[in-house]
Image (cartoon, rainbow, N blue to C red):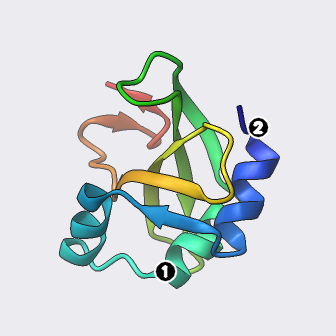
Amino acid sequence: MKNLAQIRQQLAAGQFDFSRHAFRRAVERNISEEEIRSAGAQAEIIEEYPEDKYSPSVLMLSVTSAGRPLHIQVSAADSDATRIITLYEPDPREWVEFRKRR
């Protein structure tokens, strides 16, 4: 299973791919590859899902260079590229400092 440093490195280097769902969400929400790369380099894990449907995954929080908060859920399974499961700008009404669910 990948650790935080490995996931950050792959996101920052652009070594990621999207699930079909994540790709649609990125387009709908106007989240660019550059935002993912810059945010991914310093993302922190805020939730872990060891029993996720297809493989263990984690929810990460980061802020883009423009100050936009992003949640990026990625597969933590060992692979050549990090798989992004979904990504979105968290709703402050649902999150405390974007780190903890209300």
Give x and y (percent) for residue 76: 60, 38
Q: Give the class, few, some or many, for how many residues have Cα within 10 Å of label 1's Cα (few <14, many ≥20).
A: some
User: Which residue is found at the position 61% from the left and 37% from the top?
Assistant: 77
The residue to which callout 1 is attached is: 33
Alpha carbon distance from label 1 to label 2: 22 Å
Q: Secondary structure at mark 2?
A: loop
User: Which residue is found at the position 24% from the left and 64% from the top?
Assistant: 25
Q: In the image, is 77 to the left or to the right of 8?
A: left
Q: Is residue 41 visible?
A: no
Q: Secondary structure at mark 1?
A: helix
User: Which residue is found at the position 51% from the left and 77% from the top?
Assistant: 35
Q: Is residue 101 visible?
A: yes
Give x and y (percent) for residue 47: 52, 28
The vertical placement of 31 against 17, above or below, is: below
The vertical placement of 21 against 39, above or below, is: above
The vertical placement of 26 against 9, above or below, is: below
**First-in-chain label (1 vs 2):** 2
Give x and y (percent) for residue 48: 54, 25
Q: In the image, is 62 to the left or to the right of 27?
A: right
Q: Return the mark for residue 3.
A: 2
Give x and y (percent) for residue 9: 77, 61
